[in-house]
Amino acid sequence: MLRVLTFNLQHGLPGAGAGDGTAATGSLAGADIRDPATARAVLTALAEQIGELAPDVVALQEVDLGQARSGRLDQAGLLAQLLGWRHHRFAAAWAGPVAGLRRRPLRPALTGPADDILGPARALLGLGPAGFGNALLSRHPIGGCRVLRLGRGPASCVRRGDNPIDPRSYRAFTATARNLLAVRIELPEATLPGATGISLGVTHLATRGDTAARQLAAAWAGLASLPGPHLLAGDLNLPAERITALGMARMLGDGPTFPVARPSKRIDHFLTDPWPTDVDGVPLGIGVAADPERTFTVLDGRGRAPLLHAVDSGTRSFIVSDHAGTWVDLEPVV
């Protein structure tokens, strides 16, 4: 079995989950994470909460690297360290400070000055790389890694004031760059029988539904080009019915994830390979197989890989974020 957790980190900002009554998190409610020591304390408490779930993989969105608003920490690297894991990857959707000149990174890992066109200048000022994006943390080794840029949707104008005819009631927002981080996680044979690994992707899509749908199609196509089985996780900013209508992948897991104080909708999802179908396009039932061994597999161009299903799933709040996390326990379909 493989347990995967995904949630929107919201750059480690303490949220409604920080006031859940426990001493460790209650003391950090409203904490100012611009202070590095405080930011580290918040992530330490978060790592303890994640550890209680005992996931094998954690997919994160809205992850900061070197940002003043979150103590200039490497959030992905520090969380992996606090979990006792040696394997993680970060992919910046953009480089630079949150309040400043954002730009496309030369290399999304942002591991050094050469990965950002302004990196050498920042180094002269004593500043390390800065960026914002997605991350994957894993207790198992990570093999190959691929980053696919998904573009940014059109700018939007949002009313924030009470008077609809007052121009000052409106604010214009430029769209944020989005990407897919996809990795190959190497697994012991007993974890997912029939599979030596899984291609796992994490993404965070646009808030506009039409843009998010286009980005999701591109993200799934990019992930599906890798060896199977496949799992895409992240804040997709789409309801389940919209994803189902796209007809390209199968959703796993259940439970509302947003807003965390009173979750009423599920916009954080897991997607995996679709069911095989017969010649009439009807999904095959469990116990009926499309291959000679009579096991459920997907043909991905590199051979067959087992289809996955969730044997358990759930949601929970954490000390940080305005989203709840959601998790699934994966096993091959037999």
Image: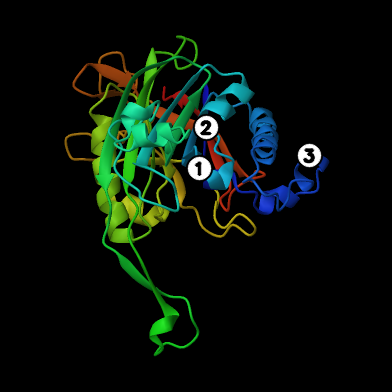
Q: How many marks?
A: 3
Q: How crowded is mark 2: few (under 14 residues within 10 Å), some or many (20 or more)?
A: some
Gap between marks 3 and 2 measured at Cα = 22 Å
32 to the left or right of 143: right
Q: Which of marks 3 and 2 is in front?
A: 2
**Distance CA(mark 3)–CA(mark 1):** 25 Å
Figure colour scheme: rainbow
Q: Earlier in the sequence, mark 2 or mark 1?
A: 1
Quadrant assignment, res 150: top left
Q: Which of marks 3 and 2 is nearer the N terminus?
A: 3
Q: Where is residue 210 in the image (x, y as percent from the top left)?
A: 28, 59
Look at 30% across and 32% down and name the residue there: 147
Q: What element carries label 1?
A: loop
Q: Which residue is labeled 1 in the image?
A: 67
* Left or right: where 166 falls relative to 47: left
**Residue at horizontal 73 percent and vertical 51 percent from the top:** 29
Which residue in the structure is indicated by mark 2?
74
Q: Where is residue 229 in the image (x, y as percent from the top left)?
A: 34, 24
Residue underneath mark 3: 24
Q: Which amino acid does label 1 sit on?
A: Gln
Q: Could you tell me which quadrant the C terminus lies in?
A: top left
- Furthest-front residue in this view: 124
Instruction: Name the residue located 65 percent from the left edge and 36 percent from the top edge.
Output: 46
Which corner quadrant of the image does residue 38 belong to? top right
Which of 95/266 is in front? Answer: 95
Q: Residue at x 26, y 31 (%)?
A: 224
Left or right of 181 in this view: 72: right
